[in-house]
Image (cartoon, rainbow, N blue to C red):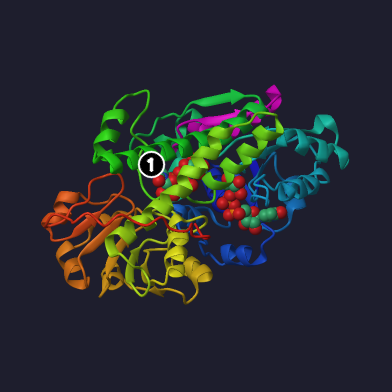
């Protein structure tokens, strides 16, 4: 099938490359000339496993890039809209890019087409997209608008797309559902997975994935509710971790105990310094605004966001309880990206914490396997970027672990111990076992677990109440 994907960001580019790998002819359209030029030069603008292979496999044949929206729409049966839906000041989703794309599509409807929301959008957006396209002259019977939310995670975007837990088709006409069934047939019928060159199957994948057909409104809500629930699960375990810290329990044991209840599940129960990224923070605010608009006061979401911010405050207090005063302290920091496996720093808890620690007068040497370039754009020269984790730890008063990169969990502890001025590690992602760290000579603090040290840690004198730091 001929498919157009509007927007070549994390979602659009991955969706376009995967649709081409399913056998469709794909035109990815973007109005960012620099990004287009890079894509046409053969560059891969985002750090995602398997994406370079797919772009190499299909670029110029089944996968093309253009800034010509009209031509792409005319040539396609399905148009997937994956442009940005950033938050407004009030936290609502800014849908102006979606609207401008809808206007652009309306003039190019030369035969029956479906317009599919791939970006995360509030419920009722499909109604508006339809209204805008009709208002700009398209025939009512010439198109349908559907919602096909994307659940891919950054870092595992390609395998999440090709091996999804489910494919949600939100459409209000059988004709539209039929087109989307055809688009996803290689996955839903399982034929893709029989191919020798199929992208390798990740653990736990369900083949074939279930295809869930709903109304457009329900599909729009499925996306917001899914992200809100996942963020709530993270905030819940972070809240439990705080209680563990007060009573001396171990959140890791608690996670094992509650996570083995199949009604709860152990995934997304990793306590830490809180969630970040381009989706959870903005989607929670957008969902909160949608609920308010619908007259429902969804205060639970406020609490999810408050706990998430509180996690960063608690981590700063932990650094203070380990180092006493912060002004002039040299800190090694591992992690800048909002999570492991990506170069994306949007709403990264690591960056927010670094900015707070800089404000407290700390000197910071930071290392991340992929996010230095993007972090430089935000942090400039306020921090020094180290060449390795050991380089970041060199002569530091303490080492902070802020992003859950796998390589940070496999460091040479002996070498780390020699690099650090004081063997103090404050782990915001619980990557190490406290006993192993103590046995390796470190004073080790983590989230929701008792601190550990070669010799008993004298309890820090009670902290005088402090004024709230503006940044956090
Ligand atoms: C997108 C959606 O923004 C987000 O709501 C959803 O949760 C995930 O998918 P992402 O792919 O990360 O997120 O967006 P972004 O990286 O901002 O890419 C959007 C692309 O659309 C950019 O390349 C931008 O240049 C392009 N764009 C934007 C257009 O081509 N036309 C426009 O009118 C606006
Ligand atoms: C998320 C959703 O998972 C995905 O389905 C949706 O399409 C887009 O938003 P993403 O933002 O890429 O994906 O990352 P995710 O793996 O969900 O992590 C989000 C944040 O939560 C990261 O900062 C991560 O460090 C944090 N996290 C995740 C935790 O703190 N604990 C956990 O147990 C899981």
Between residues 212 and 322, which one lies in front from this camera angle? 322
Q: Position of residue 359 (x, y in %)?
A: 46, 68
Between residues 354 and 472, which one lies in front from this camera angle? 472
Task: Write the start and end of the magenta stretch as one range.
Answer: 163-187
On whether ligand 2 comes within 8 Å of the CB at mark 1, the answer is: yes
Residue at x 35%, y 43% (from the top left corner) = 271
Q: Where is residue 444 in the image (x, y as percent from the top left)?
A: 22, 56
Q: Where is residue 448 in the image (x, y as percent from the top left)?
A: 30, 44
The answer to whether one can see residue 1 in this image is no
Residue at x 47%, y 65% (from the top left corner) = 355
Q: Quadrant of residue 137?
A: top right
Mark 1 lies on residue: 238
Q: Quadrant of residue 109?
A: top right
Query: Along the horizontal axis of the image, is 354 left or right of 147?
Result: left
Numbered circles on residues, count = 1
The answer to whether one can see residue 138 in this image is yes
Find out whether residue 86 is within the magenta segment: no
């Amino acid at each position: 099938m001929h498919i157009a994907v509007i927007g070549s960001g994390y979602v659009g580019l991955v969706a376009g490359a995967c649709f081409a790998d399913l056998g469709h002819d794909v035109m990815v359209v973007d109005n960012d000339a620099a990004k287009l030029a890079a894509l046409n030069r053969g560059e891969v603008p985002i750090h995602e496993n398997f994406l370079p292979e797919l772009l190499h496999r299909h670029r110029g044949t089944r996968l093309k890039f253009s800034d010509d929206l009209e031509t792409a729409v005319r040539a396609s049966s399905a148009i997937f809209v994956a442009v940005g839906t950033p938050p407004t000041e009030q936290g609502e989703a800014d849908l102006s890019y979606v609207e401008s794309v809808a206007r652009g599509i309306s003039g190019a409807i030369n035969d029956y087409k479906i317009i599919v929301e791939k970006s995360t959008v509030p419920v009722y957006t499909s109604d508006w997209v339809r209204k805008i396209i009709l208002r700009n002259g398209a025939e009512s019977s010439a198109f349908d608008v559907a919602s096909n939310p994307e659940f891919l995670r950054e870092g595992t975007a390609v395998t999440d797309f090709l091996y999804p837990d489910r494919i949600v088709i939100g459409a209000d006409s059988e004709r539209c559902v039929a087109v989307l069934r055809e688009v996803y047939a290689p996955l839903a019928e399982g034929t893709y997975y029989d191919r020798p060159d199929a992208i390798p199957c990740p653990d736990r994948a369900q083949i074939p994935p279930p295809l869930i057909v709903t109304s457009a409104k329900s599909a729009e809500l499925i996306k917001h509710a899914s992200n809100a629930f996942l963020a709530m699960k993270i905030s819940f375990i972070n809240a439990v971790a705080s209680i563990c810290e007060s009573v001396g329990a171990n959140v890791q044991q608690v996670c094992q105990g509650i996570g083995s209840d199949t009604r709860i599940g152990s995934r997304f129960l990793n306590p830490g310094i809180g969630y970040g990224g381009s989706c959870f923070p903005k989607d929670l605010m957008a969902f909160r605004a949608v609920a308010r608009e619908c007259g429902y006061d969804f205060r639970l979401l406020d609490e999810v966001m408050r706990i998430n911010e509180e996690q960063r405050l608690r981590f700063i207090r932990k650094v203070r309880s380990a180092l006493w005063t912060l002004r002039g302290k040299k800190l090694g920091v591992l992690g800048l990206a909002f999570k492991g496996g990506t170069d994306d720093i949007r709403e990264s808890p690591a960056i927010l914490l670094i900015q707070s620690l800089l404000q407290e007068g700390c000197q910071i040497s930071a290392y991340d396997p992929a996010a230095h370039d993007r972090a430089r754009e935000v942090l400039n020269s306020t921090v020094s970027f180290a060449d390795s984790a050991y380089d970041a730890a060199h002569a530091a008063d303490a080492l902070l672990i802020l992003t859950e990169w796998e390589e940070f969990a496999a460091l040479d502890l002996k070498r780390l111990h020699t690099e650090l001025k004081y063997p103090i590690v404050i782990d915001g992602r619980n990557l190490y076992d406290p006993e192993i760290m103590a046995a390796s000579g470190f004073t080790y603090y983590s989230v929701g677990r008792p601190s550990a040290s070669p010799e008993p840690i004298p309890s820090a004198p009670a902290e005088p109440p402090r004024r709230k730091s503006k940044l956090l």
